[in-house]
Amino acid sequence: MPVPDYQTLMRPVLEALSDGQAHRVRDILPSLIDLYDLTPEEVEELLPSGTQTVLANRAHWARTYLSKAGLVRSPKRGFHEITERGQELLKSHSGPISNATLAQYDTFEEWRLPDKDSAGSVEVSAKPDVPMATTTLPPEEALEAAAAELYAALEGDLLEAVLAMDPTRFEQLIIDLLLAMGYGDGKRQMAERLGKSNDGGIDGVVNEDPLGLDAVYIQAKRYDPKNTVGSGAIREFIGSLIGVSATKGVFVTTSGFSREATAFLDRVQQRVVLIDGRRLAELMIRYGVGVRSRQTYVVKGVDEDYFGNA
């Protein structure tokens, strides 16, 4: 039989992860091959891009959707295990698992239906074998919906990769991002990672002119998404800026900021920009830091001017 679609694979993937152990997706592929009695040709079938097998791609998408519903978690990068919520679903729901099943979970719906402003205009630059949001949309709308899903999945994958970095690499990542955004004319010699060298709460600096008369100072906190940055950390950063007579700063975290932290900035003279985890992933995608294009699709239409009467 042909390789099942990603929704059909959701229940088998969840069941394969239900033994209490953490597994890589590639390690559960043999069980899927046996379950659906796939032929060697079907197992080896590649995506049009030739970068991945259809089976592996769809199994990965099944795992991604399950994780967005909170049924699967990743104790470490690349390894996945079932959650208590996932175990409960297997016991209470005996039929196939699909997007309609996952829609009962708020976390899944929030991921599937992000704010339009957050998705923006994006390149289709991740997995090409896209599970479309719906099959009833016109082709161009289906492509846009697929791009939004890819974008949301890429955001999550990026933050997962960033959280696995050591603190030094993370600090360098933020410097690389600011340079990619055009600060310091994008020249590496205009930036310096201060790290642990008695920096007084400042992790890096990007000079905006050759003499260093104007500079942006950086604080980078690689926090678990559940640990919100409070006003105390912002207050300390402002103190560090005052200590070096700086007027500009960027505070970046992989988590988020409390309301008090955001409100505190209204009471200081320094210009400080707060970048939370989602905004960080968005900027990395926009400026090409830590990502690369895998496949590009160009949608063309008829040039009405060319076929005009003039």
Image (cartoon, rainbow, N blue to C red):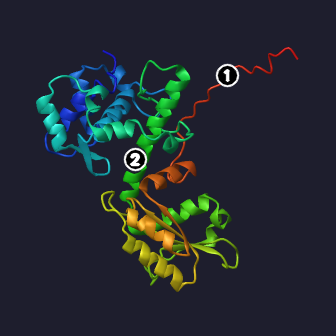
Quarter of the image holding residue 99?
Answer: top left
Q: Classify mark 2: helix, strand or loop.
A: helix
Viewer can see residue 39:
yes
Relative vertical location of residue 108 with respect to residue 254 in this rendering, above or below: above
Q: Between 240 and 77, which is closer to the camera in this rendering?
A: 240
Residue 279 locus on image (x, y percent): 48, 54
Label 1 sits on what residue type?
Answer: Gly
Relative vertical location of residue 272 with respect to residue 119 in this rendering, above or below: below
Viewer can see residue 169:
no
Label 2 sits on what residue type?
Answer: Asp
The residue under the point 57% across, 79% down is 246
Q: Which comes sooner in the sequence, label 1 or label 2? A: 2
Relative vertical location of residue 179 with respect to residue 242 in this rendering, above or below: above
Q: Is residue 151 left or right of residue 205?
A: left
**In which quadrant is the C terminus drawn?**
top right
Q: Are marks 1 and 2 in contact (CB under 8 Å)?
A: no
Question: Which disc is residue 211 wearing?
Answer: none
Residue 131 locus on image (x, y percent): 41, 28
Report the residue marked by disc 1: 301
Report the residue marked by disc 2: 157
Q: Between 107 and 40, which is closer to the camera in this rendering?
A: 107
Number of other residues with Cα within 10 Å of mark 2, as a class: few under 14, some 14 to 19, many 20 or more: some
Q: Is residue 164 left or right of residue 301?
A: left
Q: Classify mark 1: helix, strand or loop.
A: loop
Q: Is residue 79 left or right of residue 244?
A: left
Q: Is residue 192 left or right of residue 307?
A: left
The residue under the point 52% across, 83% down is 242
**In which quadrant is the N terminus drawn?**
top left
